[in-house]
Image (cartoon, rainbow, N blue to C red):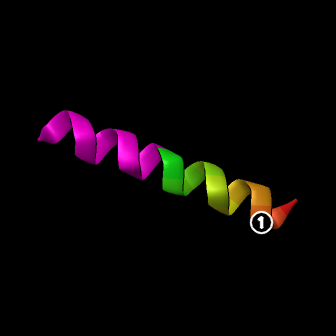
Amino acid sequence: MGRNASISSLLKNGVNLMKRL
């Protein structure tokens, strides 16, 4: 479960960065 949480958080960070650009 911890692994999925970290992956989902990374994906969310990536999406936020894409939106910033």
Residue range of the region highlighted in magenta in the rendering: 1-10
Q: Is residue 6 magenta-colored?
A: yes
Which residue shows up at 40% across the image and 51% down it? Answer: 9
Q: Is residue 7 magenta-colored?
A: yes
Measured from the top left, where is residue 12 in percent x and y? 51, 57
Left or right: 15 as drawn, with respect to 18 = left
Amino acid under disc 1: Lys
Left or right: 9 as drawn, with respect to 14 = left
Dominant secondary structure, magenta: helix
Quadrant assignment, res 18: bottom right
| Mark 1 Cα-neighbour bin, 10 Å: few <14, some 14–19, many ≥20 | few
Q: Which residue is mark 1?
A: 19
- Picture mark count: 1
Which residue shows up at 65% across the image and 62% down it? Answer: 16
> Relative to residue 7, is residue 15 depicted above or below?
below
Measured from the top left, where is residue 17 in percent x and y? 72, 55
For the N terminus, the image quarter is top left
Q: In the displayed orientation, state which residue is furthest to the top.
A: 3
At mark 1, the secondary structure is: helix
Which residue shows up at 37% across the image and 39% down it? Answer: 7
Measured from the top left, where is residue 2 in percent x and y? 15, 39
> Relative to residue 19, is residue 15 depicted above or below?
above
For the C terminus, the image quarter is bottom right
Which residue shows up at 64% across the image and 57% down it? Answer: 15
Left or right: 17 as drawn, with respect to 9 = right
Left or right: 21 as drawn, with respect to 11 = right
Q: In the displayed orientation, state which residue is furthest to the right.
A: 21
